[in-house]
Image (cartoon, coloured by chain):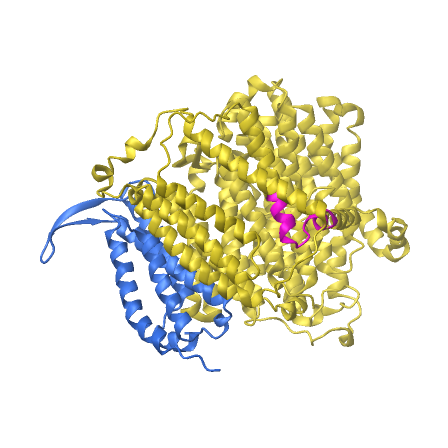
Amino acid sequence: MKINDVILKTITKAVVLIIITFGIYLFFSGHNSPGGGFIGGLVLASAFVLLFLTYDVETVSEGVPISFKKLSAFGVLLAMVSGLVPVFFGQPFLSQSFGYFDLPIFGKTELATVTIFEAGVALTVVGVVVNIILSISEGSNKWKP
Amino acid sequence: MHLLIVAILIPFLAAALIPLLYRRLGNLNLGWFVLTVPIILFTYFASQIPMIAGNETITASLDWIPSLGINFVAYLDGLSLILALLITGMGSLVTLYSIYYLSPTDSLPHFYAYLLLFMGAMLGVVLSDNLLVLYVFWELTSISSFLLIAFWYHRKNSRSGAQKSLLITVAGGFAMLAGFLMLHSMTGTFSVREIAVYIMQYTDHALFYPALFLVLLGAFTKSAQFPFHIWLPDAMEAPTPVSAYLHSATMVKAGIYLVARFTPIFGGTAAWFWTITIVGLITLFWGSFNAIRQTDLKALLAYSTISQLGLIMSLFGMGSAALYFDIADAAAIYGFATFAALFHLINHSTFKGLLFMVVGIVDHQVGTRDVRRLGGLAKFLPVTMVFAVVGSFSMAGLPLFNGFLSKEMFLTATVNVMSMPAFGADIIGWLIPVVAWTASVLTFVYSMIIVFQTFFGKFDSKRLDRAPVEPNIGMLISPAILSIMILGLFFFPNVLADNLLAPAAAGIVPGVDAAVTIGPWHGFNPEFFMTVGIIVLGAALYLLLPRWGKVYNLLPSNWSFNNLYTKTLSFTEGTSNRLTSTYMTGHLPHYFSYIFGFFVLLAGATLVFTGALNLDSSNDQPASIYEIMLILVMAGAAIAILFAKSRLSAILLNGVLGFSIAIFFVLFRAPDLALTQLVIETVTTVLFLVCFNYLPEWRKEYTPRRTKVLNAIIAIAGGLTVTLIALSVNSVDLFDSVSSYFEDSYELAGGNNIVNAILGDFRAFDTMLEVLVLFIAGIGVFSLIRHRVGKEADSDENQ
């Protein structure tokens, strides 16, 4: 019996966009309201998981040519390097700083180094979660971007 | 940062660069890049000689963990400089030699990375003043040695040799660390120089002798002293440049360095004097005795290295008595031994490095290093033969070569000690020169074996893999330099003595302030006749070797230390295997009962016995209707899981629990937690579903009633313990809350979200490590599943 999943596929196309947007929103809003790198990464990962559930691994890997293993390694590296930078300015490892700037479109904006650190966290979470699920679903053998 | 610290770090940086350079440079040019590192460092250290010769020292420090008294203090004095010059000098020669020795099919980036790692670690050992920093570098040399011995890891012998060396040297290293900690608890400092000053007040301390013996254990294992020498012959599985560098010239000298460095601390005690002297002499004799029976040239050199290390060790032991005497003359007599030790330390590196290179050339050119197959190579490898003669004759202690000078000084030192009344040496002291002389005769015999059984005698091409020809000129440069040094040190020993040996010896023991003048001729004294005796008897023994060689068959083969090591290893492996398999049943319910059983016992008992149990509910908020409803839903779901008929329903019920917790977080106004919990629950459910592939069919298992009851008790007790802890926590106020600090997150971290300010800023270290753990877990899952069917790799490993 062939499963008819037209509805699922159609809805997924729309929903994945919403989820990804929501994930990115959560990531940036984390500074002042609920959200942050970890939860943002998880939401993004769940978007990918939904894609894999709806379509098969090959189709998604053609559309999203990302190596999730490398992504997670890059995330860890980013988090660590962002912590190392302050050392060269005489600050303890992993010190964060922030400042307020006048930007052209955004107006007065706060920029914080913690965003870079959190980006590392988010990328690691996305990479690891997708990688684990792909590995376990045995799709990892076919997953070669 | 001081140049001295930079010098230690350079090899590490170069090692890190190798993977990048390898892509651009390729196999061959990589060696030339690596070669620049020791040459630059050697030039730097050589430029410090004039300053050290003027009895000055350099100290450079870098704060590392100042709160624990651990700072990166680099200290350069005469002793360190000698070792540093050996490390970088031999390093240059060995790297040059290895460019031609290794084949392009070997994994050269690994080789050079390990070699540089070792170089940096070894420099760290000899330049560190802080004991803990020294310890870290010390273990790093063991690890790089392990990696280099197992360089050809497809060979079983390489792997077992590497394992043996690691087990023995690291075990000794642990003992040494314990000794260091004892020294710290006595004197309150980790600095070697400060300990040497303060230790005077603590010689009666209960920890003084334990610390002494533990430190010696580290030194003896590293320097392959009897009975820990068994790892060194097995380490010969390493590529020959490695044997020349680590296992004869530098790393095995680390133990000797440690003894020299600690002589100002422990020296002057009878225990230090006798332990080192006796162990050194036994090693000297046993090594030389066993070297003769070896048929593999590298094994012969390994035993000879063991023996020579014993010689240097015993000299440092005898020299330590100088600290016992206040009279300058007596101190000078013992100090002479220390001086000879340093001289022989350098000489040994030159001639043994040379001999390893010669054996490497022979092995490389004809494909074997078995003396029974070799012979008559002089005609084909004349240049190599000359190098072999220089190295062997120097090791045998013949004139014209530097080994003669230091060997005579060694004999002088033994005769002197016999005549001096230190620590009862006048009673059994006559044994020292006797053992020294016997071992020297044996040394002469095996030195002759290397030259005459390889290069002279009958040539038989059928027994060789390849027709012998002289190697590439590049392979001969390093041995040539070493040969020139051996001859140069014989004719001009006092250049070395004045500039390096005297300041180094003066730093170890008193009484050698006036530099000793080294000369080849001292008249017809006992040492002269001993040398003549060595040559005459040694030559006779060498010629009669076929007659008396049977003596080795008399030794019982299963009473060796090697056998003890193998037996101990297989016994511990077998026992722990049996012990582990009694409780690692592969049955999840068993594991859960262990985990929760221990949890209940430890946490529950702590709760009860410390009186922390407190069920005062007066501070608690009354439960609202929502909360009661949620609890009922959760309890219902939890109970329903127990009776679920299929996995799918169990997972869905588990999901009910998770989502209810998320709603609790909403009720308690923790939106961050609620969000996280919701997404986690979603992802976990998917994870469960994809895991279904791997699981066997769901079926009821028969469990005996007793097990069921026990499991139920453990489960209920576990739940009860958690509940009681949760209730008690709320009603005890042990200290002020720290949360008020985090409330200022907007001022301190620029963000209103306290949770994220804590995660990303206040406690970012935790988050970083959690991310790392997550990553490692991801890689672990990936590799476990990817290499599930890795059976063929297993057979590949044990060819």
User: Which chain's colour is yellow?
Assistant: B
Taking depth in this image into account, of B762 and B189 the one nearest to the observer is B762
Would residue B216 appear left or right of B481 to someone viewing this image? right
Q: Note whether B43 is above or below B450 in the view shown.
A: above
Taking depth in this image into account, of B570 and B454 the one nearest to the observer is B570
Q: Please state the total of marks drawn on the protein image.
A: 0
Magenta residue check for B331? no
Q: Note whether B210 is above or below B690 in the view shown.
A: above
Taking depth in this image into account, of B251 and A92 the one nearest to the observer is A92
Q: At x 67% / y 43%, what residue is drawn?
A: B709
Q: Position of residue B443 (x, y in %)?
A: 75, 48
The answer, for residue B400, to whether it is visible in the render is: no
Query: Range of the magenta residues?
Result: B578-595
Would residue B159 appear left or right of B101 to someone viewing this image? right
Q: At x 73% / y 32%, what residue is drawn?
A: B415
Q: At x 37% / y 45%, what residue is drawn?
A: B664
Q: Position of residue B706 (x, y in %)?
A: 71, 45
Q: Residue furthest bottom?
A: A1
The answer, for residue B373, to whether it is visible in the render is: yes
Q: At x 49% / y 82%, what residue is drawn?
A: A1
Determine the colour of chain A: blue
Q: Note whether B361 is above or below B551 in the view shown.
A: below
Q: Quadrant location of residue B19? A: bottom left
Q: Position of residue B798 (x, y in %)?
A: 69, 66
Question: Which quadrant would the C terminus of chain A be assigned to in this image?
Answer: bottom left
Q: Position of residue B132 (x, y in %)?
A: 51, 36
Magenta residue check for B594? yes
